[in-house]
Image: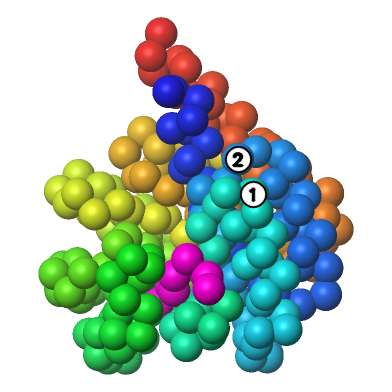
Amino acid sequence: MGDDRIKSRLFVEVEAGPAAADRLAAAFGAADIASVLIRPPQGGALDAQTAQPLVALAQGKGAAALIADNWELARVLRADGVHLSAGDDPEGRIEAAREILGGRSIVGADPGRSRHDAMTLAELGADYMAFSPEGEGGAEERDELAVWWAEIFEIPCVALGVGSVEEAVALQAAQCEFIGLVLPSAAPPDASRALVAEVARALADAHAQADA
């Protein structure tokens, strides 16, 4: 079961738009991926036409397809769930998402830098807690929050925007369940394949060394 557990740690973020499906397909060609977070294109909105091919690709590979912030679109596309980014009224948004999607869908949440909001969202039924490097403190504070969450709570932790192999390995060692990688939208699909392959290999090697 060891390799499957390592593969299941990968949580990729893809920005919808031109060549997004090619980037995502390349990522799947490098390793098994647990979840795909589909975000809107830069400066634009996410719609059914751009998101549907990505949902189909992810689900066809056995990964959970998550729509960023739009639970209505997630329902229409029969995605596996929604990811709620950090923002105003986190309690109201998670309640609205759960009402629309029901109990079987995934509703994950990013509480920003608030530990109080993280615990509140967990109490309201969030299926995972995500921490990103955006905002004050950057990656260092993201890592601190992810480690805090992974040490104390049973609800899975996602560290978003992991930027290096070293970060990924350290977060895995801290028992963070999912390692979030952003597929580079300004680079060819081969860059996505190389990123996912490098991180997946490093996680597997670190796991093997820890078990040795």
- Image quarter hosting the N terminus: top left
**Marking on residue 119:** none
Residue 68 % position (x, y): 51, 77
Residue type at mark 2 is Asp
- Image quarter hosting the C terminus: top left
Q: Residue at x 28, y 70 (%)?
A: 103
Q: Is residue 198 magenta?
A: no
Residue 163 % position (x, y): 57, 52
Tell me the magenta residue range.
78-84
Q: Residue at x 39, y 18 (%)?
A: 210
Q: Provide the secondary structure element on which disc 2 rests.
A: loop
Q: Residue at x 42, y 55 (%)?
A: 159
Q: Is residue 83 magenta?
A: yes
Q: Quadrant of residue 46?
A: bottom right
Left or right: 26 as drawn, with respect to 43? right
**Marking on residue 32:** 2
Residue that lies at the very extreme toward the top in this rendered image: 212
Q: Which residue is mark 1?
A: 61
Residue type at mark 1 is Lys
